Amino acid sequence: MIPLWAQIAGGAAAVASIVSSSTQTTRLLRVRTAAGIAPSTWLLLATSSLAWFAYGVSVRSPQQIIANGTWVILVIPLSWFMLHDKPLRTRLGAQLLIAFSLLVLLGLGVLNENIPAYIGMPASILVNLPQIRYTIQHGRGPGISVAAWAFLATSSYLWFTYGIGAGEVPVIINSGIAALLGTTAVVALLVRPATNFSGTDLTSDADLVTGGVKNMEVPLAPDSI
C-alpha cells in the first residue's frame, strides 16, 4: 500500500511533468525549430520518454502513464524538427522507428516490468549532461523553454519523493540524480544569453518573465510562463 503522502507527491510530479512536456512542445511548435537542443539530448530524451512510459504501463501506474505519455508526444515534433535538414523519407522513417521502439519496450515490460526502467534510467540520468555542455558552449537557443526545464527538475524531486514512498528503487535512483542534474541545466540556461539565430523568434522565457520584452503581445501559452 502506497502512503497517501507518496500518492500526493506522485500526482504532483505527474502534473509538473505534464506542464514541462506541454510547455516544451508548445515552444517547438511556436518557433518551429529545435535550435538550442543538443542532438544527444534529443536521443536520450526519446529513449527515456519511451522507456519510462513502457515502465508505467508495466507497473500499471496511472501517474507515470499520463506524465510520460506527454513526453512521448513531445518526442514526435522534436524528432521532426531535429531532422529538419533531412529528406522527408528520413523524417517519416524516424517517426516509424519511434513507434516500433515503443512496441518493443512495451513487449519487454510484459516479460519483466523492470526492463523498461533499466533502459530508461541511464538515458534520463544522462539527458541533462549534453544539454548543460551545449548550453555553456552555444548559449540558449530559441527552441528550448527554460520554464519547461524548470518544471522538469521540479517533477524529478517529486518523483524522488514518490519513489521513496512507493518503494520503487528505479524511480528513486533515476529521479534523485536527474533532479540534481536538472537543476544544473536550468541554471546554465538562465545564465547563458540566447544565441542569435537568423529568421527565428528569439523571445526567451526569461525575457518574458523579467519583462525584458516591451510592447509585445504575449500569447497565453505555457511557454510564455
Image (cartoon, grey):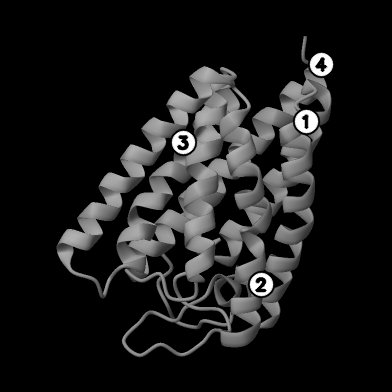
Does the residue at mark 1 contact the one at mark 2 (Cβ under 8 Å)? Answer: no
Task: Confirm or deny contact between disc 2 and disc 4 (CB under 8 A).
Answer: no
Single out the mark in the foreground, 2 or 4.
Answer: 2
Q: How far from the left and from the top, in percent, is residue 181? A: 74, 60
Q: Nearer the viewer, mark 1 or mark 2?
A: 1
Q: Which quarter of the rendered picture does the C terminus lie within?
A: bottom right
SS category of the residue bearing label 4: loop
Q: Which residue is mark 4?
A: 3
**Which amino acid does the dot numbered 1 rest on?**
Val
Tell which circle, 1 or 2, labels the residue nearer the N-terminal end: 2
Give the residue type at disc 2: Ile
Left or right, 122 with respect to 157, comes to left
Residue at the spot 46% in from the left edge and 33% down from the top edge: 105
Gap between marks 3 and 4, in whole Å?
24 Å
Q: Secondary structure at mark 3?
A: helix
Q: Is residue 91 left or right of residue 145?
A: left
Residue 132 — which label? 2
204 to 25, vertically: above or below:
below
Q: Gap in Å between the C-alphas at discs 2 and 4?
A: 35 Å
CA gap, disc 3 to disc 1?
Answer: 21 Å
Q: Is residue 13 above or below residue 93?
A: above
Residue carrying label 1? 169
3D distance between C-alphas at marks 3 and 2? 25 Å
Q: Residues within 10 Å of mark 1 (few under 14, many from 20)?
A: some
Mark nearer the N terminus (3 vs 2): 3
Query: What's the amino acid at mark 3?
Result: Gly
The image quarter in which residue 150 lies:
bottom right
Q: Which disc number belongs to residue 69?
A: 3
